Amino acid sequence: MNFLRGVMGGQQSSGVQPSGAETIQKLCDRVASSTLLEDRRDAVRALKSLSKKYRLEVGTQAMDHLLNVLQTDRSDSEIIGYALDTLYNIVSNDTEEAAESEEENQQVQADDLGVQFTEMFMKQETVTLLLSVLEEFDFHVRWPGVKLLTTLLKQQGPQVQQIVLVCPMGVSRLMDLLDDSREVIRNDGLLLLQQLTKGNAAIQKIVAFENAFERLLDIITEEGNSDGGIVVEDCLILLQNLLKYNNSNQNFFKEGSYIQRMKPWFEVGDDNSGWSAQKVTNLHLMLQLVRVLVSPMNPPGATSSCQKVMYQCGLLQQLCIILMATGVPADILTETINTVSEVIRGSQINQDYFASVNAPSNPPRPAIVVLLMSMVNERQPFVLRCAVLYCFQCFLYKNQKGQAEIVATLLPSTIDATSLSAGQLLCGGLFSTDSLSNWCAAVALAHALLENSTQKEQLLRVQLATSIGNPPVSLLQQCTNILSQGDKINRRGSKVQTRVGLLMLLCTWLSSCPIAVTHFLHNAANVPFLTAQISENLGEEEQLVQGLCALLLGICIYYNDNSLENNTKEKLKQLIEKRLGKEIFIEKLSFINKHECYSKAAQKPQPTFSNPDHMMFDHEFTKLVKELEAVIIKAVYKSSEEDKKEEEVKKSLEQHDNIISHYKNVIREQDTQLEELKQSVSSLQAKNEQLQTTVSQQLAQIQQHKDQYNVLKVQLGKDNQHHNAHNSSAQVNGFQPEEVSRLKEEIEELKKQQDLLKGELSEKNTLIQNLSSQAGSQTEQATGGSEQVSELQKEIETLRSQLYVQSSEINRLQTERMELLQKIEANATAAAPGDHAPQAKNIELEEKVASLLRELNSTKEELKSVSEERASLKQELDSVRSTAAILQDEKLKLTQEVSESKKEQDDLLILLADQDQKILSLKNKLKELGEQVEDEDDLESGDAADEDDLDDDDGREDDM
């Protein structure tokens, strides 16, 4: 500032006033050349003060110097703040012009100037630098930085968004502004994020995953929900930016349970008078946010899941309370009706709940009836009537139960004369003098028939009393009567709107319902009326009526079942060709989709019209026109033969559909059975897992017991070794060490003999196999002898069983002998040298052992006799075989060799058995003496041997 005073003072003293451009040039030079920070700061401050009045000069001369200050003087927050303020004044279009007398085009020039300076700023690629500046916590730096970046986004939004998107942690730095304790920066940060998230799905996703929903909902709650100020409005706008047309963020919002936090927004009190403008704005935005989540333009799955959550958390119930409350502003009530409409659209649970809502009146009336009363009341606002119609359409959308309830209120058997029903209101609106009521009632009644052939047939039963003394007429006939008497209505525009509504109702009613077509054609005046309307050359307003009449006549052709002789498909087509011409008929039909109101109505389900005169088409009807137009044109050009073929194809398709439906039912039943089987399998699997767990636990216990047993066995072996070492020179149970060594030598010799015998046995087996293969061809000749052989073999098997019994007895005796020896050893160990009583007991036990040995020898002798008897039987077997071999010499030789080989094999088996017995007895003796002996049988038997040893140990403990 001293420099500025000096410049200005020097200029004044000389009597020459400097221009603004010269002053700005000197200040820019000072910023660029001054070495003192204070001088540069004063120069930047002076530029800031001149930037509003001399915006062009400062922008063109000082921008580069200001950007250089942002890079070089980051340590001084004051000069950075001045520089940011100056840049904001340059690029912003919000600054007021100093001279109020300037023309209005100056503002347009200022806007262009801001865009130009923004482009200059963007060319400098300084957005990244600006983002880094926002990390400074100083208020005088962060606040002007936020405002500057917001202005850049307004001027060059897409370019700035791309730079922020590629900048590391760019979005995260901006999200930190929401946590700033200074409300000014937080609120301006909301405005910044609003501009940043406009139309950029990638940034919207990043902001959402930076916990934006949680932060914004917390701010709304802190500010008082709908009673809050403009900060709540900014938060709601930002939430809409994040959720609208962004399916990913909508799913994240739902999965994060944020829908439940919206319920307190709509908790209004009983006193609804005197709502502030800000509260109305806030609640309007809150309702719009709910509609964003359940919009019909969203994917069906996402919409239905949000609808379900809104019902479960009570949000729908709260909206219905506002809907039936008194004193609610009209625009809020209208938006609430639209919101409830989309929350219940296509959701059966929500539609059922809405049908049960009653208005707080005396007597209580259903909410649907109260809303329909507003729709057919011409004194109600136009937007409110459109909202009620949309609500009724959404209530009936994919709701056959609701459609049946509405139609039932019109049937003679269910009409209640004491109360006002929805059907009575619709009929009253359909035939009132207000054309808008006619159109709304016709469209509402058409929605009660959409894709529901049953209700189309039921509606044919409705009878109306036109006047006293006259018989009642059907609803279908009354609609056609009104169409034919349309010229009696005064206003031409109203007449067109009424006729369009009735024609849309008739087209919807007759489509896909041959019975309704027959009823319509049964009135002889209807077809001539339609052809007369189509053939006339009328103005543009009547062309839409002509197109709808052509569509209705085409429906009568396409869905005609030829039950009326005078109005069959072929006759109607001949009538069109004679009276109109097929080309003219098709041209009239095309008037529908060429109308400007048609394309607007086809865009979205909600009826949005700027004024009542534009209310011509319904969204669902445009879908019906698209579906029917092509098939009607095809049906008009078809010949009778093609119609017959098509009918045959239809019949075959119906049969095919019946077969398919039958198989579908079968498949459903099988699916049910399959589900039951799956459940049983799952239960069995659970039981199996439990059993496997039990088995694994038991196996672990068994393994633990085995480990304990092995430990005890090792300990017992160590004790025996110690005992044998202590008494190595003494007599052990009557056996001398020399005898032990002799037994070992015998065992080794027997093992060698056993190996030799096994070798000879394997050679004999090979020889027998060879001989058997040679004798296989001559087996038939020896059949008689084989019978005797089989008898002898049976006797041999008997002897073998006796031999097995004798062997078992020998094993039992040996076991008893071993137990006695063990008892002797235990008594010998426990007895003292001077004790005579244990010695006497040992003598008794030795006597028992001797007796057992005698029994064993006698048993062996019996075994020997049995073996001799077996040998004699074998001799007989050999003689029988020799007699059988006489049949052929060559057979005799082979049979003799076989018999001799088998005899030798048997002898070897006997020797092997004896050797095994001797080896077993000797090993048992060695074991009794405490010697370590490798037992091959124990190794082969595995766990069985361990269990036998365990039994032996238990026996020892019992004897002890």
Image (spheres, rainbow, N blue to C red):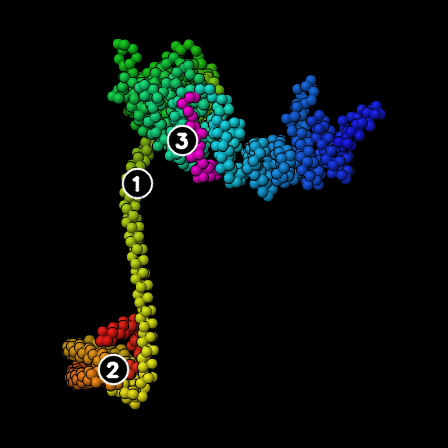
How far is mark 2 from mark 1, CA to CA? 91 Å
Which kind of residue does numbered mark 2 sit on?
Ala
How far is mark 1 from mark 3, CA to CA? 39 Å
Q: Which percent across, then down, holds residue 740? A: 29, 87
**Quadrant of the image for the N terminus?**
top right
- Do tag 1 and tag 3 residues touch (Cβ < 8 Å)? no
Q: Residue at x 29, y 16 (%)?
A: 464
- Residue at the bottom extreme, as displayed: 738
- Helix, strand or loop status at disc 1: helix
Q: Which percent across, then down, holds residue 372? A: 37, 20
Q: Which percent across, then down, holds residue 304? A: 40, 35
- Helix, strand or loop status at disc 3: helix
Q: Could you tell whether 636 is left or right of 120 in the image?
A: left
Which kind of residue does numbered mark 1 sit on?
Lys
Asked if residue 888 can be seen in this view, the reply is: no
What numbered label is drawn on residue 831? 2
Q: Nearer the viewer, mark 1 or mark 3?
A: 3
Mark 1, other Cα within 10 Å: few <14 / some 14–19 / many ≥20? few
Q: Which percent across, then down, holds residue 527? A: 35, 18
Pick whichever of labels 2 and 3 is earlier in the sequence.
3
Quarter location, residue 382: top left
Mark 3, other Cα within 10 Å: few <14 / some 14–19 / many ≥20? many
Region of the chain picked out in magenta, as a range: 246-272
Q: Residue at x 30, y 52 (%)?
A: 686
Query: Is 250 a magenta residue?
Result: yes
Q: Residue at x 23, y 76 (%)?
A: 960
Mark 2, other Cα within 10 Å: few <14 / some 14–19 / many ≥20? some
Q: Which residue is mark 3?
A: 315
Q: Which residue is mark 1?
A: 664
